[in-house]
Image (cartoon, rainbow, N blue to C red):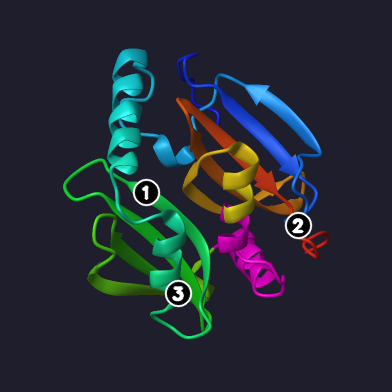
Amino acid sequence: MSATRPQTYGMLTIALVGLLIAAPARATVSADSTPTALHNEADGDTAADRQAISREIERFRSSSISISQAIAIAEARHAGATTADVSFDGGSGVPVYRVKTLHNDRIWRHTINAATGEVMGGEAALPLTELDHEDRSNLAALGTIRHRLADAVRVAEKAASGKAISGGLVRDGGRLNFAIVVISGDDLKEVLLEPPGARGK
């Protein structure tokens, strides 16, 4: 999350101690970062970058399916699955959500039509053994905490007064957090949430 971006899209990082706390414990404003979910080939060209991000946001706003609905659709494919990562992709063709779920020591990749909720194409599964050590460690921790990405999305949308466009697991200062990117007005806000019980995972 270190690419340069125009000043018109501020980025607000809100760190919350836990998913059940409604008010942010600390907030830091940074106007020179682009959330990972909105990076594209135009990075480095300010005008083209601004236009690409604006198009992505407009396609997201016109979608019928929310990120929470996309998570529920993907998790319903395998009983007991939990979402590790979700992002909106409106860059080409039909706008979709790309959802990665964890189930039976595999990462399942799903593509959900953002207009209809239909699962597009087949599922792709990747064994956890093929991931690097940090990713395996993060996913192992995900399986042991009580709260889920869907919980983090609800809290982030309320805290940032907007709609989530992406979310996933990140390590920040050695701590496992949910990072949710929310569109609030014309701003992109990143909300970091440390799930209760994640410390030391």
Helix or strand or loop: what does disc 3 sit on? Answer: helix
Within 10 Å of the Cα at label 2, are there few (<14), some (14-19), or many (20+) other Cα atoms?
some
Which kind of residue does numbered mark 3 sit on? Answer: Glu
Percent position of residue 55, x then y: 28, 31
Residue 174 vs 32, above or below: the answer is below
Residue nearer the viewer, 47 or 9: 9
Percent position of residue 180, x then y: 56, 46
Mark 1–mark 2 Cα distance, whole angstroms, equals: 25 Å
Helix or strand or loop: what does disc 1 sit on? Answer: strand
Q: Which residue is mark 3?
A: 75
Which kind of residue does numbered mark 1 sit on? Answer: Phe
Q: Which residue is mark 1?
A: 88
Residue 20 horizontal side relative to residue 3, left or right: right
Of mark 3 and mark 1, the one earlier in the sequence is 3
Is residue 122 visible from the viewing direction of this image? yes
The image quadrant that residue 53 belongs to is top left
Determine the main secondary structure of the stretch shown in magenta: helix
Which kind of residue does numbered mark 2 sit on? Answer: Leu
Residue under the point 40% across and 71% down: 74
Residue 173 horizontal side relative to residue 113, left or right: right
Marks 3 and 1 close (CB-CB < 8 Å): no
Q: Which residues are magenta?
A: 132-153
Q: Is residue 11 magenta?
A: no
Marks 3 and 2 close (CB-CB < 8 Å): no
Percent position of residue 93, x then y: 16, 47
Within 10 Å of the Cα at label 1, are there few (<14), some (14-19), or many (20+) other Cα atoms?
many
